Image (cartoon, rainbow, N blue to C red):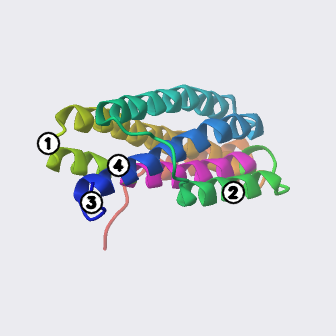
Amino acid sequence: MSKNTLKTLYVDELKDLYSAENQLVRALPKMARAASSDKLRDGFEKHLEQTKMHVERLEQIFRSLDESPKGKKCMAMEGLIKEGAEVMEEDFEGAVMDAALIGAAQRVEHYEIAAYGTAREFAAILDEPQHASLLEETLDEEKETDEKLTEVSKEINVRAVEPISGEERSKRGQLRKMPRRVA
């Protein structure tokens, strides 16, 4: 196969995703252990199971292409995971650590959303509807995970503020729910 084809690029993108997902399988348990929020820890544990399914879907695509998923290391994910590990080594505690973990996790999710969107489009153009469907399923799950992290962050970020009274915390929570006016 010529190096200068969309199919070659597609397989390369899939290998990158396969590497990224396998790196995440190893990183998510560490993030779960570092979380102090039960909700966040549970989210990381559920996403680990989902990530294992992402790996299985990619393996299914590779089998249908008669290609090996190995041979490439996703340097972007390696960097994102390294940043997450650095966050976990900081002196942050409690909700502040949880807020930092959410930030690191959302950077990962945004990378994956971009990568799966690209791969899905390549699959569609290459007339691989089954691949496109599998990649779309994973893309939807990545978007859903990002949305869940945003929801959890609303509660955690309020708790991460310097110690404040319950009344002040309640007021801040109400302010966040108010519609923003555009000038």
Distance between the alpha carbons at the discs numbered 3 and 2: 34 Å
Distance between the alpha carbons at the discs numbered 1 and 2: 36 Å
116 or 43: nearer the viewer: 116
- Which label sits on residue 82? 2
Is label 3 in a helix, a strand or a loop?
loop
Distance between the alpha carbons at the discs numbered 2 and 4: 25 Å
Q: Amino acid at mark 2?
A: Lys
Is label 2 in a helix, a strand or a loop?
helix
Q: Nearer the viewer, mark 3 or mark 1?
A: 3
Q: Quadrant of the C terminus?
A: bottom left
71 or 138: nearer the viewer: 71
> Does 108 appear in magenta?
yes
Q: Identify the mark nearer the N-term, 3 or 2.
A: 3
According to the image, label 1 marks what residue?
A: 127
* x, y percent for residue 1: 27, 54
Q: Identify the mark nearer the N-term, 2 or 4.
A: 4
Q: Is residue 68 placed above or below 164 in the rendered structure?
A: above
Q: Is residue 85 left or right of residue 13?
A: right
According to the image, label 3 marks what residue?
A: 2
Q: Amino acid at mark 3?
A: Ser
- Proximity of marks 1 and 2: CB atoms separated by less than 8 Å: no
* x, y percent for residue 180: 37, 60
